[in-house]
Each structure stands twice: as C-alpha cells, then as structure tokens.
Amino acid sequence: MVTDRDVQELVAGVLEIDVADVGIDKSFYVDLEMDSLHKAEFIVALERACGAEFAPADAARMDSVGDVMRLLHDRHRVT
C-alpha cells in the first residue's frame, strides 16, 4: 500500500527536490516543472512501489499527488 507521503517522496526523488516542496495539489508540470522524462521515471517508480502497471491514459491523468492518490484509491492500493 502506498501513502500520499510515499508519492511525495517519489516525486521529490525523481525531481531531486525537497519533499516539503511537493504539495498534495501542486501541479507536476506547472508548479514543480516536471518534464516528460521525469514523468516516465516517476511512473516506473510508482509502479514498483505499488505493484501495479498504469495505462498511458492513467499516467496522463496524473498531474499532482492528489491525482495519483485518487487513482490509487480507485484501484484500492492506498491505506
């Protein structure tokens, strides 16, 4: 099971920023300046962390930690 803190840490690790800068509703692209390569790296790390694969359409919907958590909640992969 993955928590919002786990997702924040994954994002921070990929972007090499402080986890405190990764707010729940901050846009990966606008606020955190994530590019497509970072996004791909993040998706791979997330898949490993929660033991699931994400379709490209699911990955495209992920633009914040909140979006990721909603998707994971829908798939019953959060605590």
Image: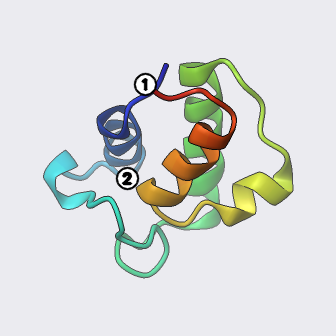
What amino acid is at disc 1?
Answer: Thr
For the residues labelled 2 and 1, say whether their Cβ atoms are less than 8 Å apart: no
Q: Secondary structure at mark 2?
A: helix
Using the image, determine if residue 54 lies above or below residue 64: above
Q: Report the quarter where the C terminus lies.
A: top left
**Can you tell which mark lies on residue 70?**
none
Q: Position of residue 9 (x, y in %)?
A: 31, 38
Compare residues 19 and 73 and report the one nearer the observer.
73
Q: CA distance from mark 2 to mark 1?
A: 25 Å
Q: Of circles 2 and 1, which is in front?
A: 1
**Rendered location of residue 67, percent (x, y):** 53, 59
Q: Position of residue 2 (x, y in %)?
A: 45, 26
Looking at marks 2 and 1 on the same chain, the residue that comes earlier in the sequence is marked by 2
Apparent side of residue 30 relative to residue 46 in the rendered image (left or right)? left
Is 57 displayed left or right of 1 in the figure? Answer: right
- Residue beneath disc 2: 15
**Residue placed at 72% from the left, 25% from the top?**
52
Name the kind of residue labelled 2 in the image.
Answer: Leu
Res. 31 image quadrant: bottom left
Q: Residues within 10 Å of mark 1 (few under 14, many from 20)?
A: few
- Residue at image x 54%, y 66%? 63
Quarter holding residue 39: bottom right
Q: Disc 1 marks which residue?
A: 79
Using residue 54 as the reference point, say whether residue 32 is left or right of it.
left
Q: Secondary structure at mark 1?
A: loop
- Count of labels in the image: 2
